[in-house]
Amino acid sequence: MRHTINLFLMLVIFWLLNSGHNSALMLSLGAASIALVLYIAHRMDVVDHESQPVHLSLKLPGYFVWLLKNLVHANIAVVKHIWLGNGSISPTLTTVKASQKTNVGKVIYANSITITPGTVTVDLVDDRIIVHALLRKNIQALKTGEMDRRVSRLEN
């Protein structure tokens, strides 16, 4: 029920911000469309903690700041190794353990790996992520578990 209320509030805010009209007709059409969306979502049984990850909202900005800092450092390292040539890279394919409890947490972790320059998530199976890295030290950085711990804190 809590997730349905969150969805309702987000739809109302979205409607009010985008419509710009406050006439009775527009408000009633908005209420009718929101009611229809809520009914369809409820019938499809798609309103749950994963479709409405509101619990992540307060922790996301801090994680994004940390991730942005790592993205900048990784970009600099990739550019440096591009300038140094093929001899400076050490492509590696390995498996990294994901300690997240939810699918949302695992996907955030896998996507964080992928958007970091020099690393790509190849596959995500259960609690294992197959990662390809341009540099062996990128894999070592992942195996220290800093990103994994931060994503786990984010989902709690």
Image (cartoon, grey):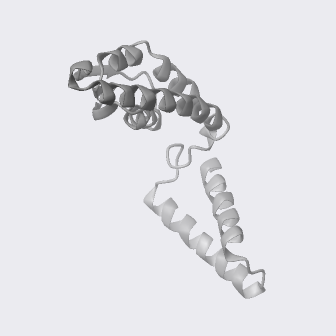
**Percent x, y of residue 18:** 66, 71
Say whether residue 14 is visible.
Answer: yes
Is 118 placed above or below 49 here? above
| Image point (47%, 54%), residue name | 46
Say whether residue 156 is visible.
Answer: no
**Percent x, y of residue 127:** 34, 25
| Image point (36%, 20%), residue name | 138
Is 45 placed above or below 68 here? below
Instruction: Please state if 37 lies on the left or on the right of 5 as rendered.
Output: left
| Image point (37%, 29%), residue name | 78
Instruction: Please state if 106 lies on the left or on the right of 41 as rendered.
Output: left
Which quadrant holds residue 116? top left
155 or 66, nearer to the observer? 66
| Image point (57%, 24%), residue name | 153
**Percent x, y of residue 13:** 70, 63
Which quadrant holds residue 94? top left
84 or 104, nearer to the observer? 84
90 or 59, nearer to the observer? 90
Task: Locate the C terminus and report the quarter of the image it occupies.
Answer: top right
Is 47 placed above or below 60 here? below
Q: Residue furthest bottom?
A: 25
Please count the marks in the image.
Answer: 0
